[in-house]
Amino acid sequence: MNSSQNWLIGKLATNPRLIHTVPVKPEWFDELAVQSLVRLMVKLDGDWLGEMDLIRKFSAADKTAAHHVDWHQIDQSQSFHFPLDATVATVQKQYTVGQAQRAATAFATQPTDSNAETLAKAFEQMQITDTQIKGDQLSSLVDEYVESIDHPQAASQPIKTMADVNMLLGGGMSGGQLIIIGARPSTGKSAFAVNLIDGIQHNGSHMVIDLYSLEMTNQETRNRFIALMSMVPLGAVKSRMLTAGQKKAVEAARGYLSHSNIQIVDSAQRLGTITQAIRKRAATAQKGHYVAFVDYLGLVEPDHPTGNRYQDVSHITRAFKVLANELDVPIVLLSQLNRENARNKREPEMYDLRDSGSIEQDANVVIFLYQEDEDDEDDAHREILIKVAKNRDGSRKKARFEFTPAYMLFKEAR
């Protein structure tokens, strides 16, 4: 193996929890024995105590392969310091380039349709590897919207958010927290997240906020922010049929957002892609000035699917919790409730979290949004109960909020 591969194996061996957030694949490594070791790491899911414990488990699982791993070179590589993300990218790039070179040689020797297809796929994979996940700044998205209005076709302190939610959370969000927001479909959990982000932006300077929108496009999410911040009905925002007063309100929202650092990402679905992007963005923020939102859990794809959704969700929530601890940032993860709760129309409980896996165990805070009277025909103003069902660092409380869907607005019911 080369120095990058040795260093990455040593890093993973001595930091078992990294296997949850580093999307490493066995085929990236030159030696078959090391490929077997990586497969074991993925299978163990971080369940080893350190390098010596991993060596013992590898020997028990595959004694022949374990004998061919050069741990002396791996240990020597650890005397150097490399950026983790850059090293992962280097090892992946080395693999894809090697695949392309072999495919090119095979096509030059035998220019068959099969070899041509293999070569095309190899170059396509190289382009995917080189692609950087980049979101759109909310301010830029609103700029784009304002310009098109007339053309309808064309850290040590808790992070403060909405005042009433701060009270429920005992002061606000804190680093290392995994916060789960659970609700049935169409209850307003995505709109609630928009309100939380707006509150964070209002209450803190130099905040860096990411919203990984797996269900809606960046433009759909942008429209929700515009409706909330301008108090222009969402329907009017979508149609771009605005009055002069509404245009001024949207312009004011645009000015407010010009100094924000809120990024919306609709191009990331896989767990490893999202965690890598969170790690990079968090590194750009001051301590205590970064929050990530993921909307929503059910759409996050595992890096190594097991075929068992319960196990996959357990791995996903554990990865987000490990990442929150590693970076000392809060991560807010939205989740749907199961169908049984919807049928019975009762107050949600922990076991109602869909494909729950280890959600309850991994989460610091679990918040449920629900309606007591879902038969209420007044859809213009819904009464939503906010229930803190779990709060590892505080008390469990409830509060009544009024949700106005037209403006995406949540406010405490008086």
Image (cartoon, rainbow, N blue to C red):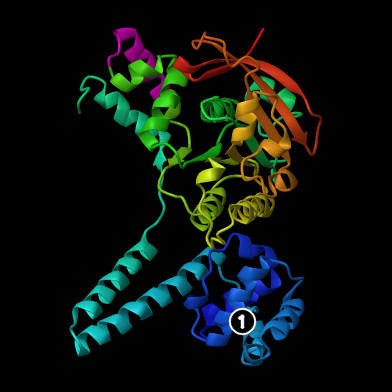
**Residue 158 inside the magenta-drawn segment:** no
For the residue pair 228 and 287, the one nearer the viewer reads as 228
Q: Which residue is mark 1?
A: 77
Location of residue 59 with respect to 399 vertically, above or below: below
Location of residue 223 with respect to 128 vertically, above or below: above
Image point (41%, 23%), residue name:
226
Residue 82 shows in this picture: yes
For the record, the magenta segment spans: 241-255
Q: Position of residue 398 (x, y in %)?
A: 74, 21
Location of residue 307 with respect to 176 vertically, above or below: below
Left or right of 313? Residue 58 is right
Image point (62%, 61%), residue name:
20
Majority secondary structure in the magenta region: helix
Left or right of 30? Residue 44 is right
Q: Secondary structure at mark 1?
A: helix
Q: Position of residue 290 (x, y in %)?
A: 59, 42
Location of residue 246 with respect to 337 vertically, above or below: above
Q: Position of residue 260 (x, y in %)?
A: 47, 33
